[in-house]
Amino acid sequence: MPSQPAYPIPGYDSVPDRALFSALPQRQSYYETHYPLYCADWTAIEGKGFESIALSSFREDTSNKLQVVHGVKTDDDIEFFRVAEVSVNYPITKLQWDPSMAAAATPAPIDRLAAAAECLRIYEIDPLQNNALVERLTLTNAKHNNLNALPPLTAFDWNKVDPGLIITSSIDTTCTVWDIRNGGVAKTQLIAHDSEVFDVQFTMDSTNVFASVGNDGSVRVFDLRSLEHSTIIYEPVPGSEAAPLVRLATSHANNYHMATVVAESLAILVLDMRYPGVPVATLEGHSAPVNDIKWHPTKNWLLSGGDDCQALVWDCTNIDRDRAAYTQQGYYPSASPGVGTPGSPSGMPSAPAIPGMVEDTPILAYYEAMEVNNVCWDRDGSWFGAVSGKGFQAVKL
């Protein structure tokens, strides 16, 4: 009998309710550092023969690290090794590789990485300097050189259609669109919420439409071609206390779907931009607060990680079909709260608030020994990564 149980159990159909469960992991496909980790992102360049993972630490002092790790895949394992490391003062709030690196047709010739903290920094791996991480751009609206005085950036998103565009969110209530082709100049800055903005994402296949969430508990959708208006697709019920929304993820397989997380919540809300006001689904599988969510690169699957030491994969493919079934069964309540509020454009259709589904069975559950702080997918979605404690664990689906 093996000393440790294997994972994951192969075959979706062999497990009741389509659920897959794994035990505490053997340390294959695992990379460990000397410090607590927080952020991660994963990509690969066509033809290079290795995976690229970016990792960053979380320490409440000025001795944080940013690392680049390469991984070589075999059939069921990945061997990781560090290739670059740089010191940073503040904990990084988000990492993202240049999306053009993963393009199969014309991949970017340079390994490029963005990191958000007190400002947004663009790094490149320089093969002429022994694969050193070299800072190429520092993006800030500051009119002085004291970066320590800047309001921290909470998140950003690197546009997949036009990799020359990056949008950032900040605790100063703003979102800023940057043009990194022209030296990192700010193209547009807008006040997105009444208080801190905690996350921001472009919608699928768009260079103009993006969504944001913040401390006011709302999800707002903006169009860069018409910034005088925004659409509130979710907000607290009038009269209730606003709970901050801390995470946002827009689907890569459905133009209308996005997911968000309420601070300290055990559930994930799935929203549809066509039906503002109420979630079309609520995912309830975590037994402690959810820390991070990421959509699969090609499927309408959502990956989540939480304080319950779990990473869960949710299949949201049939949400539209199930919602149509609800409609046919005669669910036609009154209009959703918050729809048609002052300042909302008339272009977004309003729909009746149909009760959203509650899904409590993920298609895969992975267990760690400590809290899962961050999750990510590899380029094609055949593996995912989970950050827990001082380690990064890759899990094959």
Image (cartoon, rainbow, N blue to C red):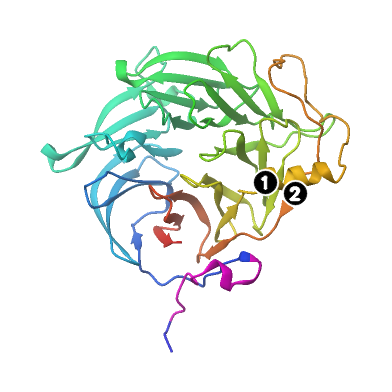
| Vertical comparison of 236 with 71: above or below | above
Amino acid type, mark 2? Met
Asked which quadrant contains residue 66, the reply is top left
| Vertical comparison of 188 with 59: above or below | above
Mark 1 falls on what kind of element? helix
Which residue has dot 1 on it?
319
| Whole-percent x, y for residue 83 in the image | 22, 49
Which residue does the image show at 81% across and 39% down from the upper left? 354
Amino acid type, mark 1? Ile
Asked which quadrant contains residue 393, the reply is bottom left
Front residue (pair 395, 33): 395
In the rendered image, which quarter contains the N terminus? bottom left
Report the magenta residues as a range.
4-17
Tell me, for residue 291, which label it has, or none.
Answer: none
Front residue (pair 71, 351): 351
Which residue has dot 2 on it?
357
Mark 2 falls on what kind of element? strand
| Vertical comparison of 325 with 141: above or below | below
Which residue does the image show at 49% across and 47% down from the upper left? 296
Q: Determine if the magenta segment contains residue 11.
A: yes
Q: Taken as a whole, is the magenta stretch helix, strand or loop?
A: loop
| Whole-percent x, y for residue 132 in the image | 19, 40
Q: Are marks 2 and 1 in contact (CB under 8 Å)?
A: yes
| Vertical comparison of 127 with 69: above or below | above
Horizontal arrangement in the rendering, residue 341 relative to residue 214 (left or right): right
